[in-house]
Amino acid sequence: MAEFHLTTPIPPEKLEEIKVGDIVYITGIVITARDEAHLKALELHEEGKKPPVDFKGNGLFHCGPVMKKNEDGSWTVVAAGPTTSARMEIFQDKFIKAFHPGIIIGKGGMMERTAKACQEEKCIYGYFTGGAALLAADRIKEVKDVFWLEELGMPECLWVYQVENFGPLTVTIDVHGGNLTEDSKKNIMKNKEKILEEMK
Amino acid sequence: MKDIAQVVEDTSFELLKVAATKLPSEVKETLVKGKNETKGSLGKAQMSAIVENVELAETNIKPMCQDTGLVAFFVKIGDKFPLRSEVKEILKKATERATKNVPLRPNAVDMFEGNTKTNIGLRGYVPWFYFDLVEGDKLEIIAMPKGGGSSNVGKMKMIPPGKGIKGVKEFVVEALAAAGPLACPPYTVGVGVGGGEDMCMNLAKKALLRPLYHYHEDERIAAIEKELLQTLNQLEIGAMGLGEGPSVLDVHMEFAARHPASLPVGVVISCWALRHAGATIDKDGNVEYHPH
Ligand code: SF4
């Protein structure tokens, strides 16, 4: 198990060195997007338009944070842990092809379609400990921007964060076709069959 | 004379805050123990992050997870407690206040109008209330917020009664295997058996309120709880589903009578953030918080 400290935009060559089970920390730009933001960004892409922020080489964070507005109009992160990534599986591959994020950050892992797109387009998936919202908030140094807040609401909109040593992220999908959570799921299913067979 | 409505509102606000920011002590202790016993660097890293995060939440009085859940209240109103139907509106007020001031994430989404931004549904069902009328002059309130990720892995099945208790156990194993890494394990599992298709889920959720390692008073049920705890850990889900460390912290079951033709089983799964907090208020407005 190796440890990497990456700066965004992450060059694709750098991603080649990383394997599943490695730990990475990110410094630079991380952008939150959940179901609705994915859909909206892809809609714009299909119309030939661009979303208001560039994902290329940056962190794409599956997260619906709790934010607090300060009196001067700026924002403070209250809590910002990862949300379940599996919900994004249905369009994540399209998103990767359209916008080329360097690392997807979420929890629970992702499946074949995403892993395939990660291999083809050079992207990795970093598993942030689910629910560890304060650890994450602690590493977010600045809220740079927010888009689509009125339209999509606080958890669903795009928050652009400047982060420092954001992690630890366990790499569960690499650019070599590896997928740790899928391996773990297979093991769970195998154990389930055995348990059911032996059950009295 | 205390303003009793205000006492109820302030207490409920406090309960929502405590639930969001501080784990019941036995849950925290179990997580720490799990961390210490975890072998393997993947699992150790996950358990350490959970424990560190729980401590940050407690010290800074901030929500331990960004998903502060959909709010539910378990309420027991004594016959001689001065307030009755007003309690509902008071609890809603407390929820709205907590949303603003803790703050909690606005999680109540109307299908047609979008996020209500208050954690109050527009159609009267959220927060969800479990009301119970009891003897005496006290009001008991338990706040239980539950995250969406962990609710998404809940399961209900009407199994053929002929399959009996073995069928129940099989279904619980299947539900947990399906949950796998999806909902922030280590999990705590509530199982409701009998009643009807609705009641089994209610019972399963209620079972999560029982403190960890307090098993059912009926020894036959306690034995199944312990057996399932062992069996479910053999699935090797592990911390965050990566196969290392604890999979399930505890299993609690509640049984109701069933219709002869049906055997409903409900499985409600909690993530590591098993959040709830309770208090009892007497008719004069004296508040006693439950051990937390
Ligand atoms: S499953 Fe629990 S810990 Fe994980 S994100 Fe949801 S509420 Fe938080």
Image (cartoon, coloured by chain):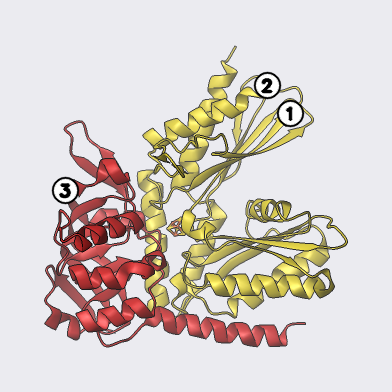
Judged left or right of residue A22, residue A111 is right
Q: Residue at x 52, y 60 (%)?
A: B152
A92 versus B129 height, above or below = below
Residues tagged by mark 3 and mark 1 found on one chain of the structure: no
Of the two numbered discs 2 and 3 in the rendering, the one whose residue sits closer to the viewer: 3
Q: Which residue is mark 3?
A: A145
| Label 2: which secondary element | loop
Real-space Cα separation, disc 2 to disc 1, in angstroms: 9 Å
Residues under numbered marks 2 and 1 in contact, where contact means CB atoms less than 8 Å apart: yes
Q: Which residue is mark 2?
A: B283
Chain under disc 1: B
Q: Which residue is mark 1?
A: B78
| Label 3: which secondary element | strand
Q: Residue at x 70, y 75 (%)?
A: B170
- Amino acid type indicated by mark 2: Lys
Shown in yellow, the chain is: B
The residue carrying pointer 2 sits among few (fewer than 14), some (14 to 19) or many (20 or more) residues within 10 Å by Cα, namely some
